[in-house]
Amino acid sequence: MNRARDAAQRIESLREEINYHNRQYYVFDDPKISDAAYDRLLRELTQLESAYPQLVTPDSPTQRVGDKPLEGFDEVVHRLPMLSLDNAFDEAEMGEFERRIRDRLKLDGDEAIRYLAEPKLDGLAVNLRYEQGKLVQAATRGDGSRGEDVTSNVRTIKAIPLSLQGDDWPGILEVRGEVFMPHAGFEALNRRARKTGEKGFVNPRNAAAGSLRQLDPRLTAKRPLSFYAYGLGEVVPAPIAEQQSASIRRLQQWGLPISPLHDVVTGVDGCIDYFQRIVQQRDELAYDIDGVVFKVDELELQQQLGFVSRAPRWAIAYKFPAQEETTQVEAIEFQVGRTGAITPVARLAPVFVGGVTVSNATLHNMDEVMRKDVRPGDRVIVRRAGDVIPEVVSVVAEKRQAGARRVSLPTACPVCGSDIIKPEGEAVARCSGGLYCPAQRKQALKHFASRKAMDIEGLGDKLVDQLVEQELVDTPADLFDLTLAQLSALERMAEKSAQNLLQALEKSRSTTLERFLFALGIREVGEATAQSLANQFTSLDAIEEADEESLQETPDVGPIVAAHIHTFFRQPHNREVIGQLLAAGIHWPAVEREPVEDRPLSGKTVVITGTLSMPRDEIKQILQGLGAKVTGSVSKKTDYLLAGDAAGSKLAKAEKLDIAILDEAALQDLLRQNQ
Ligand code: IVH
């Protein structure tokens, strides 16, 4: 008997604790325990409840997932209609919104209107009905008058409390808000789907909608859904507050999450200001939003304003330009990049998306074209988010015309006719023409001239195209032989601009070793790697002569990059161009290597082998930080072998050569001594 009483008490306190941590996580964004500790609490509760099934209540945190799939969804008639919002797309339309309000309320010049401002979440609206503090029903918006009963699915969303906190809530409380899927969860879900050969979702909104409409709540429970409350439905007794802002804060006190970005702003200027603040933050948010919603804050004023057809006069959605639109694929063509990579590109009927007119979108590579099954003539969804290159998201399958044919990878480069090669297992196909291919040559020259490389001002893309097409320039070295007469004869090139370009070329002759290395366009050698190489070797000669193993001593340079660098400098053609560039007067100051002061492993050569607790690259960087030179194979020159678990032949060889062996604990000791 006593044991049962203890169990009841423990169950009660576990529930409180779990609900508390749910609120900390979802409502206050301030988790107080680890996921593992949370899981332990839930496990303990589950075990106790299965020992005492009579103590299970419907609002227990263990009861979020039911055990049987539904046959279908019942219809729910909304007691108060779920409205939609009018949209504004620019400041002028925001101005009109406020003017209409002022006119209707007959406000004089200096009476300011306050608005509750919050992001417009891109998910789907639900109505949650709490009776006596317990969640009894959840419904989708449907057509605004009738929705679907999705209670069992909504109960699985941990951000939504099954019972309200405190005791001062009205007996009937309908909460409205948005169910959405944060990016991280969306991406994980799609990764899992792809692994099992399923299609995945086009965007987080569709994923959220699809998850809520699952007939098996056990599946919904595995979907990473979240929720923010933004309004009310039926409330008895009403009201719970006098302002919109005060009502949502009361919802928060009762354990419902609300957007942490909500704010109260004054007048249309305040709205525009808020909109701009959110635009700035948009890319960093963990979930998709498609605009900002403004609601007159005083509920009394909301009453006076009322609504027209299905939208309130007191609220508006100030929308971002759509990031996704549909349009038609006119053709699929293949572009050749600097390193010969062949990229399929969709030529589109121009469409306004993400704030600009888009007429091309990348299809990345052939695997992607196959996976998305994009064909010329298809209607497609195109996405342009932020500064990202526009891409084809998916095909609108229903709109496909009979006879639409797949494209296949060409066997010859569309620009130079050389063979296209696609190594087995790699996604990228390449033109094998190298610098014989005018497309690659143009890209190489554009890269050479670019700001972070040789920084040749005035040598833009169009000009490079002309120079290559008129066969005035083949290699970067030819740039330095251009004459005023040749340049002035080009299309749209005044003598003044020609002179400026010659001056810019002159100026670029004086550069740095890292810029020059980067400008050469060696595969996989970006700015950071060029900098490391310059630092490590200090001279171009040393880099040219280095073998793959010594190249790998450079931080960030692994076997693949080392092979690219090594191969590049073995090509007579590349050596010749470099020679010509140096003959043309390109020069840089001698590189001062960063002084290697007396560090614990200065002058020591270390080899790493076996499995360690950190990625190799990180360990390599740590060792280099301690002054060591890290190489790939054990020889007489090796001073230490850092051996992890399952070390094999290198360990044997080191033992044979009597080389000191370090284990990870010894490395940790060294680190500790040098902190
Ligand atoms: S208020 C009467 N606030 O936008 C006001 N809606 O077009 C009705 N939405 O169906 C909605 N975030 O799905 C409101 N902070 C927010 C919102 C929001 C997203 C969605 C909601 C609604 C649609 C209205």
Image (cartoon, rainbow, N blue to C red):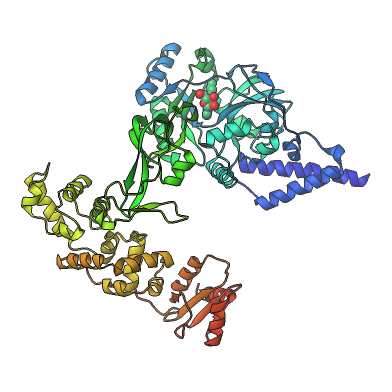
Residue nearest the viewer, comparing 120 with 118 = 120
Residue nearest the viewer, comparing 202 with 220 = 202
Of all residues shown, which one is farthest toward the right?
1
The quarter of the picture where the N terminus appears is top right
Q: Would you say 67 lies left or right of 520 here?
A: right
Give the answer, above or below, for where 204 lies relative to 445: above
Q: State the image coordinates of residue 546 (x, y, percent, origin top left).
A: 34, 74
> Where on the picture, by quarter, is residue 153?
top right
Q: Would you say 452 lies left or right of 181 here?
A: left
Residue drawn at point x = 51 percent, y = 33 percent: 262
Residue 586 is at least partly visible in this image: no
Give the answer, above or below, for where 441 lies relative to 666: above
Residue nearest the viewer, comparing 517 with 302 = 517
Give the answer, above or below, for where 83 lies relative to 525: above
Give the answer, above or below, for where 196 lies relative to 261: below
Q: State the image coordinates of residue 520 (x, y, percent, origin top left).
A: 27, 61
Residue nearest the viewer, comparing 86 with 307 = 86
